[in-house]
Image: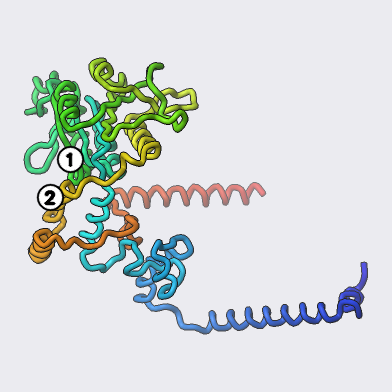
């Protein structure tokens, strides 16, 4: 209700004169600093193309990433900037690919194995392999899988007998194809299976009996997932008694594990669910169960022995070389056992995470986005006319 000059006079009263003057001086200083910053920002030259490209990694991560090696990164780089020696995978580092391989090897485990019994869906099969590899599981046992390693680094479908099918296009082979989907779908997932199998150890079996015999020989206790009421829930309390080496088995998508596997397993387990759906997709269930077992028993994630790592190095290092020079260098490292230091964090740099899509997919997406924009523009025009 009072005029502005009265309110100012009331604020700067004799009782609060000193504090009011101090507050006004602080506000004036803040305003002057803001004006100076604005003037500098509009008068500074625009960044060059090279400076913009060079700052992509730091700009994308700024304010979101903290290096475990904080003592070195805080003193030499802006907040969130990833620099060599900070523990992250950084472009241009010497022996970067081998350092990444060493990081994987240090976190690989052979204490936990995955068993897939007679899965009939190629997508689930390849998804479980990819999940197991990503979670650090090295050994995967396959019982009559839909895809089997074939010649020339490819995978071929199985038939009902568990053998690799031949002449899949013939009439006789169509009648025998029980465990596999059609060849075209198998080819689409061939790349996924090949990529995952490149870094894990696969053991194929034509029967459950042969697989169980091999598991016992390798020292694994066999657990199988089951939805029956006799299965034990994977829970923290009461604590479960985990073995030193565990093989977790997953059955088919429709009926689960076979009666023989259920009868021969040391324990039946299930992942507690709280919804009306009492089962999950095979690949989803496998990922959740593996992760839950690792959480409940961290001992099963302990790294494999050095002898096992050396065996994997002999397989991995030559495949990672991209030239004869690198092949010779990697062979020398193997011979001298002068392995590079692993990273502290497996996340790739932003510059190495650019997605790729086929040209026809890009064209379809662009056409779809254009149609959506036209529809939105048309709806906006109609709305204005109605108004």
Quadrant assignment for the N terminus: bottom right
Give the structural element (helix, strand or loop) at label 2.
helix
Q: Which residue has dot 2 on it?
A: 315
Mark before the other along the chain sequence, 2 or 1: 1
Q: Position of residue 344 (x, y in %)?
A: 33, 58
Q: Nearer the viewer, residue 96 or 27?
A: 96
Q: Position of residue 304 (x, y in %)?
A: 23, 45
Q: Quadrant of residue 197?
A: top left
Left or right: where does residue 226 sit relative to residue 10?
A: left
Q: Which residue has dot 1 on it?
A: 201
Q: Nearer the viewer, residue 178 or 69?
A: 69
Left or right: where does residue 244 sit relative to residue 210?
A: right
Q: Nearer the viewer, residue 43 or 101?
A: 101
Residue drawn at x 36%, y 31% is 285
Q: Nearer the viewer, residue 314 or 3?
A: 314
Residue drawn at x 18%, y 22% is 208
Left or right: where does residue 187 sit relative to residue 112?
A: left
Question: Distance of mark 2 from mark 1, alpha carbons?
Answer: 11 Å
- Categorize mark 1 by other alpha carbons within 10 Å: few (<14), some (14-19), many (20+): some
Q: Colour scheme in the image?
A: rainbow
Q: Position of residue 215 (x, y in %)?
A: 19, 29
- Categorize mark 2 by other alpha carbons within 10 Å: few (<14), some (14-19), many (20+): few
Residue drawn at x 28%, y 66% is 91
């Amino acid at each position: 209700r009072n005029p502005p000059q009265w309110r100012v006079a009331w604020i700067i009263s004799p009782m609060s004169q000193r504090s009011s003057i101090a507050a006004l001086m602080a506000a004036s200083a803040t305003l002057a600093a803001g004006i100076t910053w604005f003037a500098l920002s509009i008068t500074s030259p625009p960044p060059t193309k090279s400076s913009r490209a060079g700052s992509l990694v730091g700009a994308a991560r700024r304010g979101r990433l903290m290096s475990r090696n904080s003592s070195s990164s805080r003193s030499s780089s802006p907040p969130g900037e990833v620099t060599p020696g900070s523990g992250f995978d950084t472009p241009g580092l010497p022996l970067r690919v081998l350092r990444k391989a060493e990081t994987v090897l240090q976190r690989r485990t052979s204490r936990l194995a995955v068993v897939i019994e007679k899965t009939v869906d190629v997508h689930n099969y390849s998804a479980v392999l990819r999940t197991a590899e990503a979670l650090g599981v090295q050994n995967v046992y396959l019982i009559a899988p839909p895809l089997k390693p074939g010649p020339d680094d490819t995978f071929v479908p199985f038939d009902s007998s568990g053998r690799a099918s031949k002449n899949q296009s013939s009439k006789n082979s169509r009648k025998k194809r029980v465990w596999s989907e059609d060849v075209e779908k198998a080819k689409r997932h061939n790349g996924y299976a090949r990529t995952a199998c490149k870094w894990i150890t696969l053991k194929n079996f034509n029967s459950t009996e042969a697989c169980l015999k091999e598991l016992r020989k390798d020292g694994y206790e066999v657990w199988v997932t089951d939805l029956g009421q006799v299965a034990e829930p994977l829970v923290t309390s009461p604590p479960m008694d985990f073995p030193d080496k565990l093989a977790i088995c997953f059955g088919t998508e429709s009926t689960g594990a076979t009666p023989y596997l259920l009868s021969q397993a040391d324990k039946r387990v299930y992942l507690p669910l709280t919804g009306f759906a009492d089962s999950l997709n095979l690949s989803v269930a496998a990922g959740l169960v593996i992760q839950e077992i690792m959480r409940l028993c961290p001992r099963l994630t302990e790294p494999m022995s050095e002898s096992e790592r050396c065996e994997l190095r002999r397989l991995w290092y030559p495949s990672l070389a991209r030239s004869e020079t690198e092949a010779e260098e990697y062979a020398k490292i193997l011979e001298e056992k002068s392995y590079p230091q692993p990273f502290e964090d497996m996340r790739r740099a932003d510059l190495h995470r650019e997605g790729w899509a086929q040209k026809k997919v890009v064209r379809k997406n662009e056409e779809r986005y254009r149609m959506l924009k036209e529809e939105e523009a048309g709806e906006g025009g109609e709305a204005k006319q109605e108004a």
